[in-house]
Amino acid sequence: MTSDQLAIHTFTTKPWSIDECIENYARHGFGGISIWRETVEGEDLARVSRRLKDSGLKPVSYVRGGFFTGTTAEARRQAIDNNLRIIRDSETLGLPMIVLVCGATPGQSPRENLSQIQDSIAAILPAAENAGIRLAIEPLHPMYAGDRCAVATMADANDLCEALNHPLLGVAADVYHIWWDSKLEQEITRCAAADRLFAFHVCDFKADLEHPLLDRELPGQGLGTCARVNDLVKAAGFSGMTEVEIFSRRYWTENQHQFLEKIKAACAPLR
Ligand code: ZN
């Protein structure tokens, strides 16, 4: 895969400001960008949007909305309000899709969490429709199912999409979270056949994680899970930008220009 087919998540180069991300991704020849809310916190979003347009980078995703669950109706209403704000910000930034990390509240069963997630996505879909913004449910590895995301498999995400059945609602498939699933091929096929495979995130999963969130590997390293999942996703017909999402405290201590070049080289063998 060539670098113009890749979009970089700004959290991948966490040491950089949004302006450095935009300038340097374009300079290194990457095709697109997905912007994390943390990277633009306190920024004038209209200014960032203009800068993004001038860069020629393709705007891919705003990361991330969600965290819908809560033990009280008030908590869930606040989460919906927060997501409505995220939709407005995404529109201002000119980003056509929001990745949803859907939430999980300790003490609630997976079924309760999933039911609240479904109700809350239903509540924000009209605003997403007004803004013309797609919502991509991201299943997270089950190690996060207790407190971050009750959507733990592609099947969970596909079920939610089927229940809500809206053309702007789909799935973000992330190698880190889904590689282990023995039903992966059928669920990726199911997702793509329904035109719901909206996004694909790459990195590699490694054994002996030093941190459950911040120790991802370059594609082809770690357990070498990326190429197989990439093949499944591409065989299913996914033709969007492949998004690079590598959180790594180790790589963040390195020169970020060199890190981008390592990403380019690691992704080159992917088809
Ligand atoms: Zn992801």
Image (cartoon, rainbow, N blue to C red):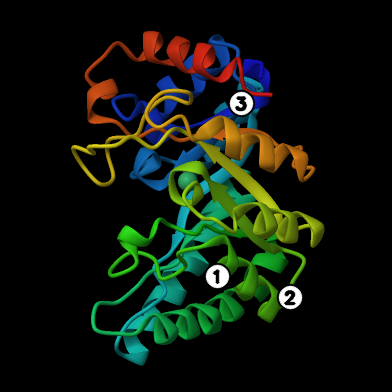
- According to the picture, the residue beneath numbered tag 1 turns out to be 156
**Quick one: SS at disc 3?**
strand
Q: What amino acid type is highlighted by mark number 1?
A: Asp
Q: Position of residue 192 (x, y in %)?
A: 75, 54
- Depth check: give the residue in front, 160 or 180: 180
Left or right? Give the position of 95 relative to 141: right
Identify the residue at image location x=45%, y=35%: 245
Specify whether tag 1 is near ligand 1 (CB below 8 Å). Answer: no
Whichever of callouts 3 and 2 sits on the residue coming sooner in the sequence is: 3
* Three-letter residue code for mark 3: Leu
Q: Position of residue 197 (x, y in %)?
A: 69, 53
Residue located beneath label 2 in the image: 165
The residue that disc 3 covers is: 6
Between the C-alphas of marks 1 and 2, the distance is 14 Å
Q: Quadrant of the C terminus?
A: top right
Q: Is mark 3 within 8 Å of ligand 1?
A: no
Q: Could one spot residue 3 in this view of the protein?
A: yes
How crowded pointer 2 is (Cα within 10 Å; few <14, some 14-19, many 20+) is rated as some
| Disc 1 to disc 2: CB gap under 8 Å | no
Height in image: 66 above or below 69? above
Q: Viewed as shown, does residue 71 lie left or right of 88?
A: left
| Mark in the foreground, 1 or 2 | 1
Name the residue: 37% across, 28% down. 222
